[in-house]
Amino acid sequence: MHPLVPGDPAPPPAPAFTRDSRLMLIAPHPDDESLACGVILQAAVRCGAAVRVVYATDVENNPWPQRFMERKWRIHPADRRRWGQLRRKEAEAALLALGVEAESACFLGLPDQGLTDLLLHEPASLAATFSGLIDDFNPTDLIFPSTMDAHPDHNALAVLHHLLLRDRASEAAAVAGWQFAVHGQNPIFLKNAGPFGASAAETAFKVKAIECHVSQLLLSRKRFLRYAERPERFLAFDPAALPGSNDSLQILSRQESGLVVRLSPQEHFFDREVILIALGHSEDGEFTSTALRSSPRSSRTSWQITLPTGEIFAPERPIFLKLCRRSLGFADKGWCEAAALVRPEAVADASHNGVALHESLQGA
């Protein structure tokens, strides 16, 4: 890497730790800690930082590796629970390979591939769970998935923690947030996320951690080990923005009564049913959500939807939108933001304050 010269853009910020640091990692599934954060966890341990790894799910809904490993076709609920316990043990072994004590792991057992549904149906409860974990551990650094990750479990946790950190941004000891991506190669993320360098020894320990996830290597060994060949990247949290892009939705307008959005033509392929999810805050500051389920009228033209929001969301708070549809693989487009409404009285107050400030400065 050649040195920076005047006029060069500054490199993206990257996490740095001391013995006083307290690092909390939000992992949607066992194996995310190794694939995306194996090097940064080693760095935190080496500095003497306290570490907590929160696993949202056990990846119990992972039938194909389980069918291959157990030589059985029908997977029953008891089989899924047993598989989830296996995945927990693999995660604890991976943490030990990275120098993190197994006692640092916290397993929530939330439904695998069901976090978007939880965000829709139980947003306040889900927010309270993770907010309580943050309060209990009191991290200096919080690492969580990116809104640009293509896996729905990942970007569900991403938008949740984005909102949680926004609510805490005004606190005196605000948490430094960092986002990682596992699924997909979003160009915006790759452009803005800073690489976290790794030594040969750190890479070797990362490989050992990945190899602890034996159940996943049966069908995906080459794919998993490729994560050790590329640098880990972390995007600094910005409370003023929800980074990312969503070309499946265009927000046309927002009024007190509702949101008007347009779906892109490709979302009508085969006349699939689509679900538009909205997440935000109620008037009393609680997390709340709603959804609109519809079928497209035409596969050749853009389609406009009006989502009633007036009695659900606080006008002065933003609303986050996501389009859900069934597809093979991870084709998730993530979330986009509808900006808060600016009330006329707020504009008048701002204008009045500006005039008062100008007159005050002139008088001084």
Image: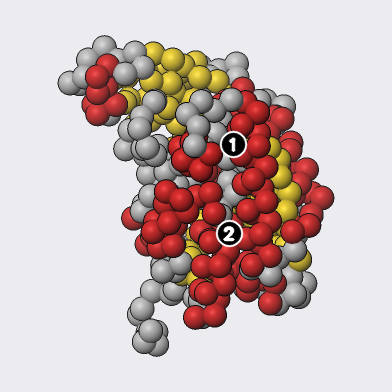
Label at residue 212: 2
Kind of residue at disc 2: Cys
Q: Position of residue 32 (x, y in %)?
A: 55, 53
User: Considering only order in the chain, which callout, 1 or 2, is on the residue closer to the N terminus?
Assistant: 1
Q: Position of residue 80 (x, y in %)?
A: 60, 32
Q: CA distance from mark 2 to mark 1?
A: 17 Å
> In the rendered view, would you say 12 is above or below 262?
below
> In the rendered view, would you say 232 is above or below 336?
below
Tag 1 residue:
60
- The quarter of the image holding the C terminus is bottom right
Camera-side residue of 221 and 180: 221
Which residue is most to the right? 136
Q: Quadrant of residue 328?
A: top left
Q: Position of residue 62 (x, y in %)?
A: 51, 37
Is 178 left or right of 17, judged from the image as shown? left
Q: Position of residue 201 (x, y in %)?
A: 54, 80
Determine whether the residue tagged by mark 1 lies in a helix, strand or loop: loop
